[in-house]
């Protein structure tokens, strides 16, 4: 195992040297357990008799509302044995109940019975059973691409899992967003409030009482005011239709970060997400930025043949969007921002991501472990084919055994690029013309008050942290220019002093980003 780690470090040094020409090389991994180019080995020792049935009973009880219970277990990772017992339990929803057998997904808390215990600074990890994925690649590729795009997403790697010296199969190690280390590394602080989407939700406004949102769970300390920003945000995108909605949304929410997540979910056909299925995400209230940040989660059902639209609709409706998705789609500025974000990801991230090289390397890395995995859900033949080819497999869908066709990973994602570029072009955004994901021309929303006596406020839909030059020309009723002034937007607004102008009707010509808006005002 030491030899593997030494080789990994040598490969990292080579990657750093070749970084300008080898963008797919791994970045530094402060925790060896998340090194994706090492096939890890985790050994779990459980002394309790009938441990599997007990964990299963505890899991079923948790689905009925009982507290989640952990069983004591000894943990050895890559030959390193933790001194004290860790806590282990079953996890998941469809990946657990939808796939009968012994290969269950696990949650491990290294510090459950000893608060100071960790592994390489990590307190919690997940062991995912790759349910619904004969290729074993869907979650790895999804999370790897998300991180490649600069999105705060969990790190992942593969492991051979042994329980009481019995080989339990090939699993994916997934970083836990609830772990303080994850929050510190991605947001520079773990002092914020973290919320987990624990069940299906549209995130509709139901009122200011946190108890009205049982599908959202506060995972950090329940201190006074912990829910305030989250509830203000939900209320905002459900009920606010004022002219400055977009500005207020930017103040409360990392909308640029979420537009990236939404675009990647659509590209990856990740239908088991908020936009389509209303699930699988965390929200972090970051005290350093004062904003809420979206953390994507759970991609084992990505890359199915769903052909998600640019704005996915509810999975149970042909017409309705989730409230947050609808507000993005109906707001001209946010919609254009999303389209250009999508194009930038296609041009600069998706096109440059070494999909063929990485999937080939990972498949080679885990091949022997997968072939020896007698508890996996699909055949070796399906594993060998599904990286590039579509396969038909049988699984429970709505509790009924159903044949499901799953497209090949590389062929699907290659086709998605062309499909989405065509959809974006039809929506008015040709990706070959997009060069800067921040250059989104503003849209004039409102000029007020009108009539005006002294100061006219001009509102433009622009990012709240940007300042743009605005040219304002004022003409009297005879068409003569009576005022020409250069202004600058601050938080999307600027003001024009008309105190010195005689009463009457005037025409305003306002120029921003080569766009011109003409409107009339009344000075009284």
Image (cartoon, rainbow, N blue to C red):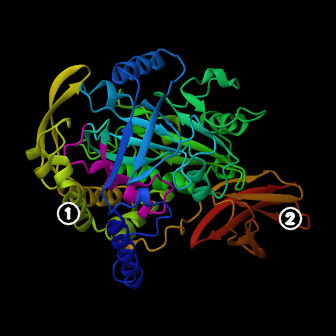
Work out whether residue 8 can be spotted: yes
Q: Quadrant of the C terminus?
A: bottom right
Q: Nearer the viewer, residue 178 or 119?
A: 119
x, y percentage for residue 324?
53, 40
x, y percentage for residue 364?
19, 60
Left or right: where 297 falls relative to 208: left
Left or right: where 265 falls relative to 465: left
Q: Which residue is mark 1?
A: 360
Q: Nearer the viewer, residue 267 or 92?
A: 92
Looking at the image, is mark 2 or mark 1 earlier in the sequence?
Answer: 1
Crowd class of label 2 (few under 14; some 14 to 19; many from 20; radius 10 Å):
some
Tell me the element at label 2: loop
Residue at 60% x, 38% y: name it: 114
User: Residues at badges 2 and 1 in contact (C-beta under 8 Å)?
Assistant: no
Left or right: where 444 falls relative to 370: right
**Which image quadrant for residue 428?**
bottom left
How far apart in space, not on screen, are marks 2 and 1 (Cα)?
Answer: 67 Å
Residue at 41% x, 24% y: name it: 48
Query: Where are the magenta residues, as a range?
Result: 132-161
Name the outermost residue toward the right. Answer: 500
Crowd class of label 1 (few under 14; some 14 to 19; many from 20; radius 10 Å):
few
Q: Nearer the viewer, residue 482 or 384?
A: 384
x, y percentage for residue 317?
36, 28
Above or below, comparing residue 197 to residue 480 in the picture? above
Tell me the element at label 1: helix
Residue at 56% x, 35% y: name it: 112
Work out whether residue 25 can be spotted: no
Q: Which residue is mark 2?
A: 498
Above or below, comparing residue 21 to residue 209 in the picture? below
Q: Check residue 74 for magenta coloring.
A: no
């Amino acid at each position: 195992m030491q030899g593997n780690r030494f080789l990994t470090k040598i490969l990292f040094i080579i990657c750093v040297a070749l970084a300008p020409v080898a963008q797919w090389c791994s970045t530094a991994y402060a925790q060896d357990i998340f090194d994706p180019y090492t096939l890890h080995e985790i050994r779990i020792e459980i002394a309790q008799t009938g441990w599997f049935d007990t964990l299963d009973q505890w899991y079923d009880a948790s689905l009925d509302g009982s507290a989640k219970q952990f069983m004591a277990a000894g943990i050895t990772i890559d030959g390193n044995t933790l001194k004290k017992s860790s806590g282990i339990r079953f996890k998941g929803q469809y990946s657990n109940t939808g796939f009968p057998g012994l290969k269950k997904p696990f949650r491990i808390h290294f510090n459950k019975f000893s608060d100071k215990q960790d592994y390489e600074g990590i307190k919690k990890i997940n062991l995912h059973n790759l349910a619904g994925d004969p290729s074993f690649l869907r979650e790895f590729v999804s999370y790897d691409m998300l991180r490649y795009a600069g999105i705060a997403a969990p790190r992942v790697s593969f492991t051979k899992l042994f329980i009481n010296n019995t080989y339990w199969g090939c699993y994916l190690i997934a970083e836990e967003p609830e772990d303080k280390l994850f929050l510190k590394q991605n947001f520079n602080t773990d002092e914020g409030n973290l919320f987990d989407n624990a069940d299906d939700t549209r995130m509709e406004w139901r009122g200011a009482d946190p108890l009205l949102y049982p599908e959202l769970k506060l995972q950090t300390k329940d201190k006074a005011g912990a829910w305030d920003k989250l509830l203000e945000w939900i209320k905002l995108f459900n009920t606010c239709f004022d002219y400055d909605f977009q500005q207020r949304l930017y103040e409360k929410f990392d909308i640029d970060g979420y537009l990236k997540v939404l675009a990647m979910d659509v590209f990856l056909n990740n239908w088991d997400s908020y936009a389509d299925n209303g699930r699988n995400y965390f929200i972090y209230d970051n005290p350093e930025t004062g904003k809420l940040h979206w953390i994507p989660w759970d991609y084992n059902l990505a890359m199915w043949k769903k052909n998600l639209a640019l704005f996915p609709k509810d999975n149970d409706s042909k017409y309705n969007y989730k409230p947050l998705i609808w507000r993005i789609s109906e707001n001209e500025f946010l919609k254009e921002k999303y389209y250009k974000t999508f194009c930038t990801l296609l041009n600069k991230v998706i096109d440059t991501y070494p999909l063929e090289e990485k999937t080939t390397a990972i498949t080679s890395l885990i091949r022997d472990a997968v072939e020896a995995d007698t508890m996996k859900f699909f055949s070796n033949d399906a594993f060998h084919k599904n990286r590039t080819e579509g396969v038909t497999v049988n699984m429970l869908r709505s509790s009924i055994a159903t044949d499901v066709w799953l497209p090949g990973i590389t062929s699907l994602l290659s086709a998605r690029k062309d499909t989405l570029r065509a959809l974006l072009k039809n929506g008015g955004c040709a990706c070959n013309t997009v060069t800067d994901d921040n250059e989104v021309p503003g849209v004039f929303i409102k000029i007020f008050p009108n009539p005006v006596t002294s100061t006219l406020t001009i509102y433009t839909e622009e990012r709240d942290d940007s300042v743009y030059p605005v040219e304002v020309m004022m003409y009297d009723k005879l068409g003569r220019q009576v005022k020409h002034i250069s202004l600058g937007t601050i938080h999307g607004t600027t003001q024009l002093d008309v105190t010195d102008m005689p009463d009457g009707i005037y025409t305003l010509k306002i120029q921003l980003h080569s766009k011109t808006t003409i409107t009339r005002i009344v000075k009284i």
